[in-house]
Amino acid sequence: MLAELTVENLAVIPFARLEFSPGLNVISGETGAGKTILAQAISLLLGARGQGSLVRPGAEAATVEALFEVAPEVVAELGDSLEVAEGECLAARRRLGRDGRSRAYLGGRAASLHLLGEVTGRMMAFAAQHEQQRLMMASHQLDILDSFCGREHLDLRLEYRLAFERRQRLREELDELERSAGAAAREAELLRFQLEEIEAASLVPGEEKELEEERRRLRAAAELSRAAAAAAASLGAEGDGEHSVTAMLSAVTAQLREVAAADPEIEAALARLDACYYELEDLGSILRGYAEGVSLDRERLGEVEERLDLIASLSRKYGDGGGSEAVLAWSEEAARRLDSMTADEGRRQRLEAELAQLEAEMLETARALRRARRQAAPELAAAVEGHLEDLGMGDSGFEVRISPREGKERLTAGLLDRNGAEGVEFFVRTNPGMPAAPLRETASGGELSRVMLAVKCAVAAGTETATLVFDEIDAGIGGETGSAVGAKLKQLARRAQVICITHLPQIACYADAHFAVIKHTDRAAEATETEVVRLEGEAVVDELCRMMGSGAADAEARAHADSLLRKAAGE
């Protein structure tokens, strides 16, 4: 139940605090006094968007706060997250800055606007003036039928909608994979060919350096052999030539050996010459062997050059000219890319399997929703007809027609939408003998108001909503019909707290608590303020007289007001 509503600096209301009672609470006031501002205040608490222009001139922000007496079932559902204990009041607060920025609070803690609306909407339902237009929408009519089905049905519908959203995401992922599948297949085929080409080459990192050295040797083999042989001959390898270096060195050592005994220094020089002789002789032998061993294999030269050409070609294609190491690095990345494509195919198969499983579960849930709706449709129609009779439309008929999507009774995954697999439309018959027609085509403004109230009464009987708020439920009606609406609101208020903003005295007379919105204008100061007061005793009669268009001193009007109050009290 909404125990208290406090409004501060919202449009023409500088400050107002309304302490509501159980039962029927009525808010009345002259046109333009500010009743609509109170309706906007309640909308803000329910999470509606607000504009900075709603902030009262001279104030930095507007504030709306409500205290709710939380029902035990709501405590069980929300208590842990909101730290609300049974028997405590929950404070819901909305602050709207002049700059349009908004802040929300629940239980004294900051909350998102979505959470604010979700929690307050769990405890309070608001039927504003635009509700009549929504009532004519097929989607809203389906929501009404689902609400009539009860909390378990709504939970099942929520489960279905979450699954539906998951299905949408899965389909989007699969569509994306499908769009890229053709290009990916072509790319994978190319990658396999390229990797096979690189693998067939059996590249070794850095091998081209060794091959280039071998090619240089093979290309210069003859020159190398001749040079080595000539050098070996000059050195006198294996005793070649009397004019060779070793032969001349031998002659020199022989001369020195004849006098070496006379001087130790000559002996030392002779020893060094002997070492040089043997070193040169050995070097000559090595060069002779090299000259004889140099390969003149042109076939091998061709193989080396062919291998280097292959490496250069692969390097240009895959390594940006960086050689065998760059080619091998590219092949590793290409292999990873190919593995990724293979993983995408596996992912596609997993998504398809998940989608099939999800749609099978959705079909079962959709069947359960359909059964519940078909069972509840005639019950809702009968309940609404009973309330319409109380509202002076006893000759009217009301039907809730359920039609399968595309006229197909057999459920398939292709028929499922966000709400299941069927649509709902309300049909009414407002005159005897006339066929029922869609509500959106037939009802007048006054009839639509009564149909809406009858529907709200029928749904409220099976829901846990603690507070129902009606704004201008009396649009287009008056006289005895207004009295019938007032009596129906009073009857509804036995099951839930009702707050009704009205201009009809025939409704206001049924109030358990009556609030008046009064506007004060200071023309000299060019200022307007609105206050909200709770009426008691004779003040209620005064307000009823004003609502009837008469002054408080009008004896006839006061007598009429008294009669309305007595009738409402059952006297």
Image (cartoon, grey):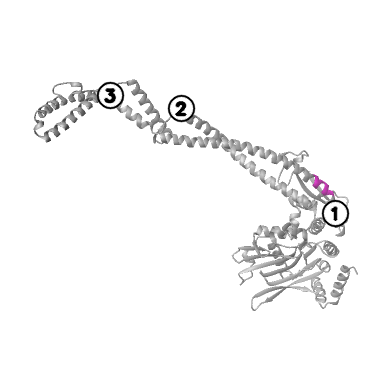
The foreground one among 421 and 275 is 275
The residue that label 3 is drawn on is 221
SS category of the residue bearing label 1: helix
519 in magenta: no
- Does 422 appear above or below 311? below
- Does 236 appear above or below 69? above
The foreground one among 99 and 359 is 359
How far is mark 3 from mark 2, CA to CA?
31 Å
Q: Nearer the viewer, mark 3 or mark 1?
A: 3
Inspect the image, locate mark 1, and give the three-letter code of the amino acid beneath it.
Ala
Which of the 4 image quarters holds residue 368? Answer: top right
Q: Position of residue 413 (x, y in %)?
A: 71, 39
The residue that label 1 is drawn on is 383
Q: What residue do we see at 14% from left, 34% from top? A: 268
The residue that label 2 is drawn on is 200
The range drawn in magenta is: 371-378
Q: Position of residue 259 (x, y in %)?
A: 8, 30
Q: Residue furthest front?
A: 261
Q: Is residue 47 visible?
A: no
Q: Quadrant of the N terminus?
A: bottom right
Question: N-terminal of the two: label 1 or label 2?
Answer: 2
Dot 2, crowdedness within 10 Å: few (<14), some or many (≥20)? few
The foreground one among 83 and 398 is 83
Inspect the image, locate mark 3, and give the three-letter code of the amino acid beneath it.
Ala
SS category of the residue bearing label 2: helix
How far is mark 3 from mark 1, CA to CA?
111 Å
Q: Position of residue 240 (x, y in %)?
A: 18, 21
